[in-house]
Image (spheres, helix red, strand yellow):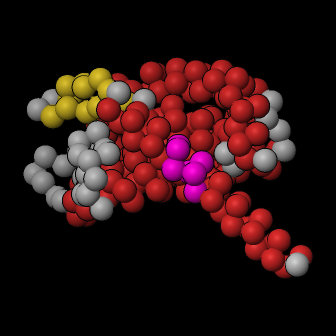
């Protein structure tokens, strides 16, 4: 009887986790369409609200749930559903800017892990977690961009580290920093609701 009850409890826990991860994956997808298009030379880049929902996942869900939420979103986009800012499909893997999407997953996990290690949901913990996530997000984006443009899709106009940072990071770093502040404020309000969902 105890074993049966344990199995039922595990199934309920799994169902709950899937629902929560699905919810945040959906929010990140919605954030992709709430965007401002920024001209970058002959190309454009998108400033979206995805980072806000990634932050909330990292600050509120814990490392595993946050990571699963973002990876669920990424898998949905890579199999072809148009949930990225410019559509979807496996070809996105060779887009230089895909690294910023990949950075969402690493950042979400890191933020959740910081909150778990410090066993705290205080504002200062969230500030530290958001700052670490912010660095990981941009760091992953820059490294991936460099790797793709120098080793996978090499062109005569390949740019270096400084140009990648100046063109693809600087225009959005300040507004993304503001989203960190907004996410911390929202997390303080949403924590009781999310905690009840997770319990």
Residue at horizontal 25 percent and vertical 26 percent from the top: 37
Q: Provide the major secondary structure of the magenta segment.
A: helix
Residue at horizontal 63 percent and vertical 24 percent from the top: 186
159 relative position to 18: left or right: left
- Residue 32 placement (x, y as % from top left): 35, 36
In this view, 174 is above or below 24: above
Q: Could one spot residue 192 in this view of the protein?
A: yes
Q: Nearer the viewer, residue 143 or 44?
A: 44
Question: Could you say which quadrant of the image residue 190 lies in?
Answer: top right
Question: Could you say which quadrant of the image residue 185 lies in?
Answer: top right
75 relative position to 181: left or right: left
- Residue 53 placement (x, y as % from top left): 52, 35
- Residue 128 placement (x, y as % from top left): 70, 34
Residue at horizontal 39 percent and vertical 41 percent from the top: 29
- Residue 35 placement (x, y as % from top left): 32, 27
Q: Could one spot residue 166 in this view of the protein?
A: no
Q: Nearer the viewer, residue 14 or 99?
A: 14
Residue 22 inside the magenta-drawn segment: yes
Question: Could you say which quadrant of the image residue 175 lies in?
Answer: top left
Residue range in magenta is: 18-24
In the rendered image, which quarter contains the N terminus? Answer: bottom right
In this view, 24 is above or below 65: above
Q: Nearer the viewer, residue 140 or 36?
A: 36
């Amino acid at each position: 009887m105890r074993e049966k009850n344990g199995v039922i409890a595990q199934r309920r826990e799994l169902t709950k986790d899937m629902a929560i991860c699905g919810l945040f994956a959906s929010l990140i997808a919605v954030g992709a369409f709430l965007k401002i298009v920024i001209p970058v030379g002959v190309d454009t880049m998108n400033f979206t609200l995805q980072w806000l929902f990634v932050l909330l996942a990292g600050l509120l869900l814990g490392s595993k749930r946050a990571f699963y939420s973002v990876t669920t979103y990424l898998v949905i986009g890579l199999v072809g559903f148009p949930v990225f800012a410019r559509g979807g499909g496996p070809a996105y893997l060779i887009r230089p800017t895909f690294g910023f999407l990949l950075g969402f997953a690493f950042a979400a996990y890191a933020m959740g892990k910081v909150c778990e290690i410090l066993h705290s949901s205080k504002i200062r913990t969230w500030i530290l977690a958001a700052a670490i996530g912010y660095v990981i997000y941009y760091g992953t984006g820059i490294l991936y961009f460099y790797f793709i443009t120098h080793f996978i899709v090499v062109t005569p106009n390949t740019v270096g580290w400084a140009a990648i940072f100046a063109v693809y990071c600087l225009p959005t770093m300040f507004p993304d920093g503001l989203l960190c502040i907004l996410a911390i404020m929202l997390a303080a309000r949403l924590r009781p609701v999310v905690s009840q969902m997770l319990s």
